[in-house]
Image (cartoon, helix red, strand yellow):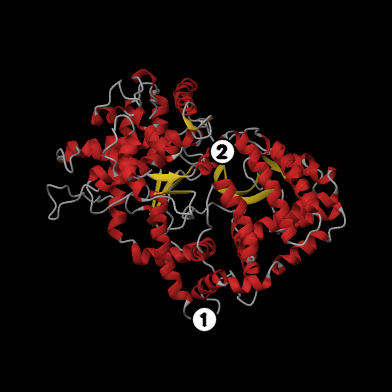
Amino acid sequence: MKTKTFIASAIVLCMVTSCSKPLSTGIRIENLDTTAIPQNDFYQFACGGWMANHPLTAEYSRFGTFDELGLRNLEQVNGLITEIAEKSHPQGSVAQKIGDFYNMAMDTARRNSEGIAPLQVTLDEIAAISSRDELSAKLGAAMEYGLFAMYVEADPANSTMNILNESQAGYALGEKEYYFDEDEHTTAIREAYIKHIARMFALFGYDDAEQRAQTVFRLEKRLAGAALNNVELRDPIANYNKISMAELQEMVPQIEWNTFFAAMNIHTDSVNIGQKRHLQECGKLLAEEPLEDIKTLFAWQAIDGAAGYLSDEVYMAHFDFYGRVLSGSEEPRPLWKRAVGIVEGTLGEAVGEMYVQKYFPEKNKQRMLNLVHNLQKAFGERIEALSWMSDETKAKALEKLNTMTIKIGYPDKWRDYTKLDVNPADSYYANVQRAAKFEQEYSLSYLDKPVDKEKWYMFPQTVNAYYNPSANEICFPAGILQYPFFDMSADDAFNYGAIGVVIGHEMTHGFDDMGCQFDKDGNLNNWWTAEDKANFDARTKVMEEYFNGIEVAPGVHANGAFTLGENIADHGGLQISYQAFSNLMRQSGQMSDSAGFTPQQRFFLAYANVWAGNIRPEEVLKRTKSDSHSLGRWRVNGALPQIAAWYDAWAVDETSPLFVPTEKRVSIW
């Protein structure tokens, strides 16, 4: 089976027995805790050494292997950027934009001398709003504040065309539970947040800061109350409501939509309203709340959004809540990391082009393509062998799998940054706002146009990967194709256990509880028989309930419904990659034991080490509310007990606290 990007003359990977230079096991003994019993706590056994050797520093609320690799990449990117920033370059060149943006980000002396002045123009404009009639135009034109978001992406029902999409926003804590849950921790977060708002208003010279803080929280709570929660947001059908502009005007009459879209320079005849109830509540809020209260909310949103780009005093006040209170960090990120972050966020593909030229050899891409091909084959075998799925649905599943597009390393064409104006004569904040406007205009340039199938949604230097259901594509940037995920010098037991499972994970997203609702062309379209979908739902329910039973902190359980898609993907990735690895061993000969472990054991050690990390208690609670991924410990100790091959490799029996009886294990893909 081939995909659009599969290279027919696949590279044959050398095994230990056939290479002139033997491959390593990839397993680093210092990462293990050999005092732990793997059958009792596999995460501690596989990751305990790494955790002991990487204690949390004051900067981090969580630090894991992802972060370790991300830091290494960040240092490499910083080297590329600083080399540029130390020299002068022609005005308008990409190098000039990168260098000037970085230097502005590093110039705290200038920001401290400017104080809050860069934001004052915006705050004055908000204060000058004199009637509700102005609100539609102000909301459309504003970059600094708003109650909902507008962006362009593929139409879920017609994946070849881009449409305008709306989504809920307007409440700074992000998760609606922070506004309503009554547990001690959440209550303390709320109280600290209100104090933080008051502190920020005071820093900006408002003499009624405490009153304004109460106003902001009341309005944000109103918006959050109408918002969907994270589980509800995972339903792609419920969040697809394509309507005409006339229907939008009727649905939310409090906003003059022609005026709003004219201010955004948008001309279209339809929009997908992601969360109808929330948008209707936005309209009611604009009509019902005192105008001065609405202006206070807008002012807060502008202050909150600008805090990272103003004086040290403002930045530290911002960090004290979002970093210390919400996440448990003790110190902010060093200035150079923040500077690299803003350059990457603004000119990410330009930086990525430099990165791959220096750090991503072509041979890595070829080996990845071979891994992907082998996993596609293994996934197809697993689909064909399913006992719970009919032949009719299997045929559709295989068709979707075989047409999946593969993107590895970096895009074939690079983004043009010509229209981005970076001018150091203006304030750092003004440049950040101009960059945000540039990004918005870039997104809107695709409106009502065919989807660009070559477009990437991550930068090449990013340590991550994704599946895009609207394009039925998987993408693996160059940044993640390094140890501990991928090691050109390591054998297949390691690479199939690490990056192989990541590949399988992204493939499985096309067949998780959300991805399975999109067809091979990326359209929301049911390709299941009713009986097969019922069987699938029953099997995913086992996964949901298993994770609901995991206690992540005293009295706090994982959210199995929220993390369901990622847990299904972990499960599928493990099953698919292990089968591909087993196929390879059958074809090429059994690999030998090494470093005291069998090849099968090394596969699972490599997988587990990907999730090694330390995390603060505050961050555990935050991520349980906000992160669709399970915590690292449970991506190991929760995922592996569902995998029969893990029991066989590590001789796990019913005496193990991790043991799950066969009939109660998850069995999907």
Q: How far from the left and from the top, in percent, is residue 606?
A: 29, 43
From the viewer's perspective, is the residue at label 2 or at label 1 nearer?
Answer: 2
**Helix, strand or loop for disc 1:** loop
Whether residue 239 can be seen here: no
Q: Is residue 114 left or right of residue 369?
A: right
Instruction: Identify the residue position indicated by label 2 in the image.
Output: 625
Q: Residue at x 37, y 36 (%)?
A: 636
Compare residues 560 and 18 and report the one nearer the observer: 560
Amino acid carrying label 2: it is: Lys
Compare residues 277 and 211 and report the one nearer the observer: 211
Whether residue 345 can be seen here: yes
Q: How far from the left and from the top, in percent, is residue 429?
A: 64, 67
- Precedes in sequence: disc 2 or disc 1: 1
Amino acid carrying label 1: it is: Pro
Q: Around disc 2, counting alpha carbons within 10 Å, would you say few (fewer than 14), some (14 to 19), or many (20 or more)?
A: some
Instruction: Identify the residue position indicated by label 1 in the image.
Output: 90
Q: Quadrant of the N terminus?
A: top left
**Helix, strand or loop for disc 2:** helix
Q: Is residue 164 left or right of residue 131?
A: left
Q: Around disc 1, counting alpha carbons within 10 Å, would you say few (fewer than 14), some (14 to 19), or many (20 or more)?
A: few
In the image as oriented, which residue stretches furthest toward the right? 131
Question: What is the spatial separation of the Cα atoms under label 2 and label 1, in whole angstroms?
Answer: 47 Å
Q: Residue at x 42, y 65 (%)?
A: 77
Q: How far from the left and from the top, in percent, is residue 558?
A: 50, 32
